[in-house]
Every structure is written in C-alpha cells, then in structure tokens.
Image: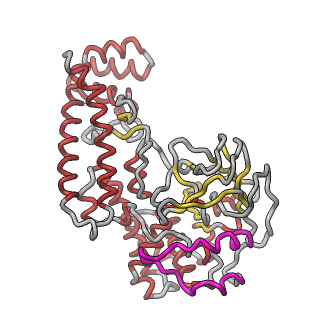
C-alpha cells in the first residue's frame, strides 16, 4: 500500500459494527444496484477452508516476498463477498482497486459481510482481557492504545496458524514493504522536517509499545515474539490498514484496496447487520482508481508518516510554524495543523495564519490585542480587516523570515539525505520527495503571497 490514498471515519450503528470496515473483493464482472446476502455463518478459527490445502504453509514476511493475490477471489466468494472491481498494480508492490467498466455515480460496487472482519472487540472476546499486557500498555501509552494492541495480537495469532487460519489467503496477499513512520529508522527521522519527524517517531513508539506488551501474552510463541520481521510486519499491517470505529479498531481484509484520493469517488456504509457496502459518489471511467479519503488531506506530512505515501495532490500543507503558544485564544483563532495552511496550487495563505500571527504580534498591546480578538470572534469583519491591513507588513515580515529559514532547513536536510546510502536506507528517496513537495509549496507561497507584499512595504 505504498501508493495508498484517503479513508473516512464511519458512524457505528450497532455493537456488531465494531468489527466492521469496508473493503473491496474481486467477485463479479457487472454493476448491480444491490447485492445478495451471503451465508450467515461467521468465519471461525476452527474452519478449515479447502483452498488452504493448495497454499504454502506459512507467510513469508521478508520485504523480498511476493504478494500472492491469486487466491483472493475464490477465498472472498467462499465467504459471501461480492463486488464489481478489478485489482491492478503499476509497480508490482502496490495493488489497488480500479473500475472494471464505466461506473455511474451512486452504484453499489462492493458488499462485504461482517463475518470477514477482524476487530479489537472481537479479539478481546476471543482472548479475554489480557490484564498484564493492558497494564503495560497503560503505563507506556494509556488505554487509548488497547484496541490497537488487541488487533496486533489477533494478527500474530492468525500468522502462527499458517494455512490453518481462515484468513490465510488475505494475510498472504498483504504488503511486505512499508514506508511508514513505524518502518523508518533514526536516520530517516534525521532527514525529515521537525513536524514530519515527530509524526513518524510517534508511529514507531506505538510499535515499540505493542512489542513490549507482547511479552505478557503467553499464547504467542517466543519465536514469534523475538522475530522483529514478523512483529514489524503485523504492526505495519495494523498501522496502515486498520480503521478506528468509535473506540474500537478494525481490520477488514482488502479494505485498503481503495487507494487514497484528495477527491474521493467512493463512500462506504454499514447495514443493520454491520456488513459493509461501498458506493461510487461520482461517475468513474473504466480503468480509473477507486479512491477513498484516509485522513485530513490538508496534512500530507501526517499521511506520509502514518501510511508511507506522499499525496502529491494534497491541496495544502501546515505552515510549519511551531513556536506559538497553544493558548485558548490562539486555538480559537485557528491554531491547528489542519487550519494554518499554505496552499499548494496558488501559494495562498489561510486566514488563520494571519489571525494567529497578528494576535501574537499584538501581545504587548493589551487592549488592541483584545479588540482584534473580539472582532475575530464576533465576526466583525470590518474591524478585523482594518487591523490586518494596518499590521500587514509586520505579519508578512514574520512570515518571510519563517519561510526563508525553513527553506534553508530543507536544503540542509536534503544534503544530509543525499549523503546516505539508499541501498541501506531505502526510504530516503521518499523522504526527499516529501521534502521536495514541502519546498515547492513554500516557494510558491514566497513568490505569490509574501514577496509581492513585502516589496511594497
């Protein structure tokens, strides 16, 4: 899933939907408005699928291993999945869903029965409360990481079963190569700008937490616990393919076959049984990728750190100003990674950047600062515009210093990255591509928004 692109959050309608999320399965060849209900029997860890006898006995997780998608269709149909999409790849690594014919907006393109999902809720029901592991996770990260850990354990349990796992055909089709923050090394973090490095390291810390708590799970073998390749693979599957639904985390086989797009063309919905239905939201020509939105498209650095891909079509990026005090007033004015933006296409600057920087500039002018803040909060556009015009040169001066210094920092990071051995540090090219995207946006902001104003001050 190196090329993956966007996914949405979903509303849980029933308790059973905790085990849900969308995915695409290759099953049929024509569009239909609705799908037939599948067999009601859930996947059980006691089921021995006849297809398993034809497959290799274990999953190779080394990066050189080839993804085996040859059995997915038969496996999916056997458990009641129905769909009208095809899978394709440009590079042999990222395999994703495309329309197999012209698909009109509002068409049903996939039905996935809930019996195929993996979830933190289901894992906890199966294993019981893992008290010792939870205690360690609580100390390391807090209870919010409990759901992730339970799905992590579930993946390892199924991995150890090999062909005896009902999910084996799906597990054996999953990626082995990841470029997410959890897969990066300290050298990688050293070549990223501060915010992107922070996001990436946070992903790595989550993996380490899961790895440490795994010591307290007695039904996972010691060989698996000590096998970094296996535990990293399992965590990266979870970190790049799982969805948060309410307070739970879910994995749905093949859900990630929808790539990310800043302008998605697919939405998913759940029925009363918790099964997943996907529909097109616009006309999709034959051969076109079917896209969802994974996360906020205005924060491509966060997407890069979590999923390992660069969304080159991201409409904007955070302005990278990191030294502002996160006061209540600043937050109300728009201090946020998703609101203080530099725009990609035209080099524009979001209003929140001006508001927060001007409020900070007025910090030594008590009543003036208060009047400006009240104007912003009360929607007094005339007063607000007057302050912005009066202090435009000061705000733009601050922005110019920031942009110029950040561009210099990017140059230094590129020099550092270029000195690394990419045979050893294979993620460096993607890191440099991320930095190049940020540089492009900053240069456009400088040329189109800052320099023309500063030139007249």
- Asked if the stretch drawn in magenta spans residue 52, the answer is yes
Relative to 396, residue 186 above or below: below
Q: Quadrant of residue 404?
A: top left
Q: Is residue 379 left or right of residue 386?
A: right
Name which residue lies at 36% across and 28% down. Answer: 348
Q: Residue at x 73, y 69 (%)?
A: 77
* Residue in the foreground of this view, choosing between 105 and 141: 105
Note whether 226 is above or below 389 in the view shown: below
As rendered, which of 251 and 153 lies closer to the eye?
251
Is 69 or 81 nearer to us in this picture?
Answer: 69
Q: Where is residue 354 drawn, in percent x and y?
A: 32, 26
Relative to 428, residue 341 above or below: above
Q: Is residue 359 visible?
A: no
Residue extent of the magenta highlight: 50-78
Query: Magenta stretch: residue 322 in it?
Result: no
Residue 95 as seen in the image, left or right of residue 24: left
**Left or right of residue 326: residue 267:** right
**Does any portion of residue 321 appear in the rendered image?**
yes
Residue 316, by quadrant, is top left
Which residue occupies 50% across, 71% down?
Answer: 152
Query: Is 165 placed above or below 417 here?
Result: below
Residue in the image at 33% along x and 62% along y: 427
Residue 34: give x, y in percent of width and height: 79, 52
| Percent position of residue 222, x then y | 43, 88
The quadrant of the rendering that contains the C terminus is: top left
């Amino acid at each position: 899933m190196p090329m993956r692109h966007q996914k949405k959050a979903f509303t849980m309608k029933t308790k059973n939907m905790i085990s849900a999320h969308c995915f695409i399965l290759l099953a049929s060849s024509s569009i239909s408005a609705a799908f037939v209900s599948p067999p009601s029997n859930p996947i059980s860890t006691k089921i021995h699928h006849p297809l398993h006898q034809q497959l290799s006995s274990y999953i190779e997780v080394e990066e050189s291993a080839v993804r085996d998608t040859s059995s997915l269709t038969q496996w999916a149909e056997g458990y009641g999945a129905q769909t009208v999409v095809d899978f394709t790849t440009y590079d042999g690594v990222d395999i994703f869903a495309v329309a197999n014919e012209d698909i009109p907006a509002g068409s049903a393109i996939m039905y996935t029965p809930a019996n195929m999902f993996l979830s933190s809720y289901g894992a906890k029901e199966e294993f019981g409360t893992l008290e010792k592991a939870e205690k360690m996770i609580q100390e390391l990260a807090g209870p919010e990481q409990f759901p992730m850990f339970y799905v992590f354990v579930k993946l390892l349990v199924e991995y150890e079963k090999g062909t005896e796992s009902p999910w084996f055909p799906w597990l054996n089709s999953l990626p082995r190569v990841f470029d997410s923050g959890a897969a990066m090394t300290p050298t990688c973090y050293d070549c990223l700008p501060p915010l992107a490095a922070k996001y990436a390291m946070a992903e790595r810390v989550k993996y380490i937490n899961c790895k440490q708590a795994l010591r307290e799970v007695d039904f996972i073998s010691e060989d698996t616990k000590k096998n970094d390749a296996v535990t990293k693979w399992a965590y990266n599957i979870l970190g790049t393919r799982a969805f948060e639904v309410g307070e739970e985390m879910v994995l749905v086989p093949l859900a990630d076959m929808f790539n990310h797009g800043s302008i998605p063309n697919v939405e998913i919905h759940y029925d009363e049984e918790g099964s997943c239905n996907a529909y097109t939201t616009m006309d999709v020509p034959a051969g076109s990728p079917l896209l969802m939105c994974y996360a906020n498209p205005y924060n491509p650095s966060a997407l890069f750190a979590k999923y390992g891909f660069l969304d080159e079509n991201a409409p904007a990026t955070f302005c990278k100003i990191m030294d502002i005090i996160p006061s209540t007033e600043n937050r109300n004015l728009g201090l946020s990674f998703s609101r203080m933006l530099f725009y990609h296409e035209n080099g524009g600057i979001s209003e929140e950047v001006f508001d927060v920087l001007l409020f900070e500039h007025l910090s030594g002018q008590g009543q003036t600062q208060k009047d400006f803040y009240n104007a912003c909060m009360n929607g007094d556009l005339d007063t607000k515009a007057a302050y912005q015009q009066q202090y435009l040169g000061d705000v733009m001066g601050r922005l110019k210093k920031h942009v110029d210094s950040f561009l210099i920092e990017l140059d230094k990071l590129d020099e550092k990255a270029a000195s690394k051995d990419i045979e050893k540090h294979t993620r460096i090219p993607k890191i440099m591509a991320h930095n190049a995207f940020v540089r492009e946006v900053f240069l456009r902001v400088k040329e189109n928004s800052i320099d023309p104003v500063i030139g007249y001050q």
